Image (cartoon, coloured by chain):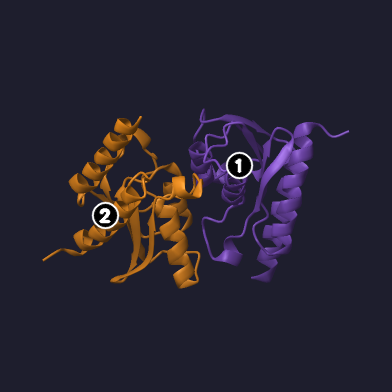
Chain colours: A orange, B purple
Amino acid sequence: MLDFDTFFMREALKLANIAFDEDEVPVGAVVVCGDKIIGKGYNQVEKLNDPTAHAELLAITAACNFLGSKYLDKCTLYVTLEPCMMCTGALRESQIKKVVFAAADTSNRSAAPNLFEVKNGILANEAAALLTSFFKKKRKKI
Amino acid sequence: MLDFDTFFMREALKLANIAFDEDEVPVGAVVVCGDKIIGKGYNQVEKLNDPTAHAELLAITAACNFLGSKYLDKCTLYVTLEPCMMCTGALRESQIKKVVFAAADTSNRSAAPNLFEVKNGILANEAAALLTSFFKKKRKKI
């Protein structure tokens, strides 16, 4: 049986796979409130030509829209890659309670500890493998 | 005659005034490419119930939409308040060339130097006065 965190990270990973299929850097995110997903997002930077269209931002916007609130202080965000500075800032603005991420991103550390509770490493290998596979595919194309 | 920076900051300040009139924290932003405004935004967090709807993010999205590009590497963003961490991250993602802001925000330092060229203090007093006036109005309502 899947534990709670693995179950929701699996959902985020499904979204990352959609991004992969659409030739986007494969990152997916879900916002969970209680035991329900109330917002989803996957990276759409290329499709929308919008550098702000990261999985986390889209999931935050969707969740706030669902709740009719600008705060997510009772929610957890699951994301397949460690959030960048923009997304970390957005999570802070949303007053999110907790962030769970899979793969670490040592190249893009947001350096923002203590803004919210953080847990990492859930399905990290699968999320990282998807990213590696994406960039391998990209390099082949060039 | 207005200099270039003051002219565009005045445009950003007009947008901040619209935010003020709509009972939003009064911040406005424009993205300038060459001598043209190609994206505008003002804070709409309350109206949209969306913590990501800061002036800068909306202006970046609008400018990228106009250019059909995810990068703003030939553009300058004018904003009436020093960008927060989210917006600084978004500006980095957009590869913006230069950022000009009016009022400083010592409470919300993004601590992200050297990501792009930065100039500050243009119309700082007017932008700060608008913010002060907004929060004074808010406190009276409570």
Measuring 48% from the left and 41% from the top, which residue is drawn there?
Answer: B89
Looking at the rendered structure, the secondary structure element under dot 1 is helix
What is the chain letter for disc 1? B
Q: Which mark is residue B67?
A: 1
Residue at far front of view: A141
Q: Is residue A122 left or right of residue A46?
A: left
What kind of residue is marked 1? Leu
Q: Which mark is residue B3?
A: none
Residue at far right of view: B1
Question: Dot 1, crowdedness within 10 Å: few (<14), some or many (≥20)?
Answer: some
Q: Which mark is residue A13?
A: 2
Looking at the rendered structure, the secondary structure element under dot 2 is helix
Q: Quadrant of residue B99?
A: top right
Residue nearest the viewer, comparing A26 with A12: A26
Question: Dot 2, crowdedness within 10 Å: few (<14), some or many (≥20)?
Answer: many
Q: Is residue B69 left or right of residue A122?
A: right
Q: Is residue B26 left or right of residue B116?
A: right
Residue nearest the viewer, comparing B49 with A27: A27
What kind of residue is marked 2? Leu
Residue A84 visible in this rendered orientation of the protein: yes
Residue B95 is situated, as x and y percent measured from the top left of the image, at 52, 34
Residue A98 is situated, as x and y percent measured from the top left of the image, at 33, 57
Tell me the quadrant of the picture where the N terminus of chain A can be found. Answer: bottom left
Tell me the quadrant of the picture where the C terminus of chain A can be found. Answer: top left
- CA gap, disc 2 and disc 1: 31 Å
Q: Quadrant of residue B78?
A: top right
Residue A27 visible in this rendered orientation of the protein: no
Measuring 69% from the left and 53% from the top, which residue is drawn there?
Answer: B131
Measuring 25% from the left and 38% from the top, which residue is drawn there?
Answer: A132
Q: Quadrant of residue A30?
A: bottom left
What is the chain letter for disc 2? A
